Image (tube, rainbow, N blue to C red):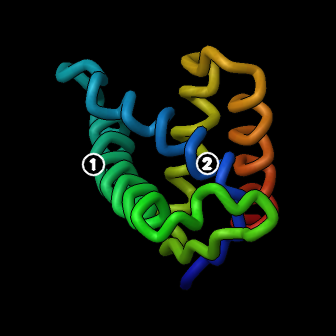
Amino acid sequence: MKVQLHIKPDALIAVHKLLQNVYNLDANQSKLQKVYSSIGFELAEKFEKLYKSKIKSRDLFNHKKSIKLTLKFYQAWALQALLTDMLSLSDNKYQEHHIQTTINQLDQKTC
């Protein structure tokens, strides 16, 4: 089962920046936290590749154009959980807004 997201470039930047915090998580984790981390690494790499490709093609600066992203269901579920848990790590209200919008979109798609 696949989940398709349409996010704005600003949301891509915000989610990418927040997912970079996955690499700084504690090594002593429970099993569930290790599952989140391993899926988080996949997602961080996926968003990193998408972010870099959009920068290279200069599409990242076209704010009217949505970016289509297809995730597997477990990735969408984990992304929502990770973004919800790490939302407090964001230091910018503008980025928090875009992250919350992405969380809401994921919530609608995974229900």
**Secondary structure beneath label 2:** helix
Neighbor class of circle 2 (other Cα within 10 Å; few <14, some 14-19, many 20+) is many
- Sequence-wise, the earlier of marks 1 and 2 is 1
**Secondary structure beneath label 1:** helix
Q: Quadrant of residue 30?
A: top left
Neighbor class of circle 1 (other Cα within 10 Å; few <14, some 14-19, many 20+) is some
At x 43%, y 64%, the residue is 50
x and y, in percent, of residue 101 in the image: 79, 46
Using residue 108 as the reference point, say whether residue 68 is left or right of it. left
x and y, in percent, of residue 16 in the image: 48, 44
Taking the view exactly as shown, the residue that stands out farthest to the left is: 27
x and y, in percent, of residue 43 in the image: 39, 55
Q: Amino acid at mark 2?
A: Gln
Of the 4 image quadrants, the one containing the N terminus is bottom right
Taking the view exactly as shown, the residue that stands out farthest to the bottom is: 1
Nearest to the observer: residue 107 or residue 91: 91
- Disc 2 designates what residue? 80
Of the 4 image quadrants, the one containing the C terminus is bottom right
Q: Quadrant of residue 94?
A: top right
Using residue 28 as the reference point, say whether residue 32 is left or right of it. right
